[in-house]
Amino acid sequence: MAFNKDRTKAFEIAYEQFGTQFTKLAEQTIRLLEKIRELKWSTDNRAKAVVAPLSEPHQQSAAVLHQRGEELSHADSCKRCREGKGVWQSCVVAPVYKDGALTFEKSGGKAWDSSLTEGVIQSGGLFAVVQQEASQKEMERERRELERERKELQRQREELERLRQEDQRQRPEREIRLGALRQNNRQPDLAVVVPSPHRVTKNSPRVKIDRTMGWSNKLLTSGSLEQVGAARRQMQEFVQLLVAHEAGLTQQRITLTELRNRGSPSASWDSLSGLDASFGSASSEGDISWTRRSGLS
């Protein structure tokens, strides 16, 4: 018979085969079928289903499961079943499951303890026991994980406490070092450093060849500051002289315009020549006087 997942059909076949001998204990064994898996159950040497008195729970389990078309190979049966040529003796219907749950010959070839069969059936079947074992292993894993997290949290707390105590111990020493650092970091007196300009080249105007301004990177003294102030005043005087010349030139050009408007062209040209000559001489004298005062010639 082909493998049938419907438990109702399994009940019908079991009642038809065993009649009144099909007890409540046998009904509970059908819970073993709650997990879909290709299983093979015991047969005799003629490859027929074993027909034996259903006096033991393991016999009832084997009979009911076989009615569903499931057979157990000799490799999956216990030693006594193999020696009995397929006749169930003392093992409950149980293949070798994952994680070694309720395996046959778990202790080196020993037969299944028949006293455990009742407990398996009362627990809801073999698959229920396997699921319980899996749930128990999962609970143990979660418990170990929680314990590991608790230990890690405790370790972190201890580390924080150690760091706090170390910080408390080093605080006086840090305060002493900080006070000394503040005393050493007082603002010093400021000094002005004027860098020396680049060396003057041949193309520099109004300055002799191979001559510098005479400045250095040393700190300025009071005498140097006086020289700088004197040079600044001379520069201001020269600028004022240029402004005065420009004002005079403007006035003379205004006069020239008035003369030209009156119709005297010869006087205009003579006046223009005189203005240019006077401005040129004045400019030359101003340049010479400023150059001499600045000490550049």
Image (cartoon, rainbow, N blue to C red):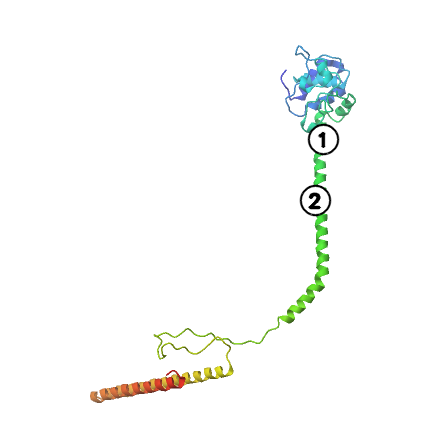
In the rendered structure, the answer to whether residue 8 lies left or right of residue 249 reads right
Q: Is residue 251 above or below residue 139?
A: below
Which of the two discs, 2 and 1, labels the residue nearer the N terminus?
1
What residue appears at the point 36 percent right and 87 percent down from the top-left corner? 289
> As rendered, which of 266 and 222 lies closer to the eye?
222
Mark 2 surroundings within 10 Å by alpha-carbon count, few (fewer than 14), some (14 through 19), many (20 or more)? few
> As rendered, which of 142 and 8 lies closer to the eye?
142
Point out the image quarter for the N terminus. Answer: top right
The numbered mark at residue 133 is 1
Q: Is residue 238 above or below residue 63?
A: below
Q: Residue furthest right?
A: 115
Q: CA distance from mark 2 to mark 1?
A: 24 Å
Q: Are marks 2 and 1 in contact (CB under 8 Å)?
A: no
Q: Which corner quadrant of the image does residue 297 belong to?
A: bottom left
Mark 1 surroundings within 10 Å by alpha-carbon count, few (fewer than 14), some (14 through 19), many (20 or more)? some
Total numbered circles: 2
Q: Which corner quadrant of the image does residue 2 belong to?
A: top right
The amino acid at mark 2 is Glu
> As rendered, which of 287 and 7 lies closer to the eye?
287
Helix, strand or loop at mark 1: helix
Q: Position of residue 122 (x, y in %)?
A: 76, 25
> As rendered, which of 226 and 41 lies closer to the eye?
226
Q: Is residue 287 above or below residue 8?
A: below
Q: Report the residue marked by disc 2.
A: 149
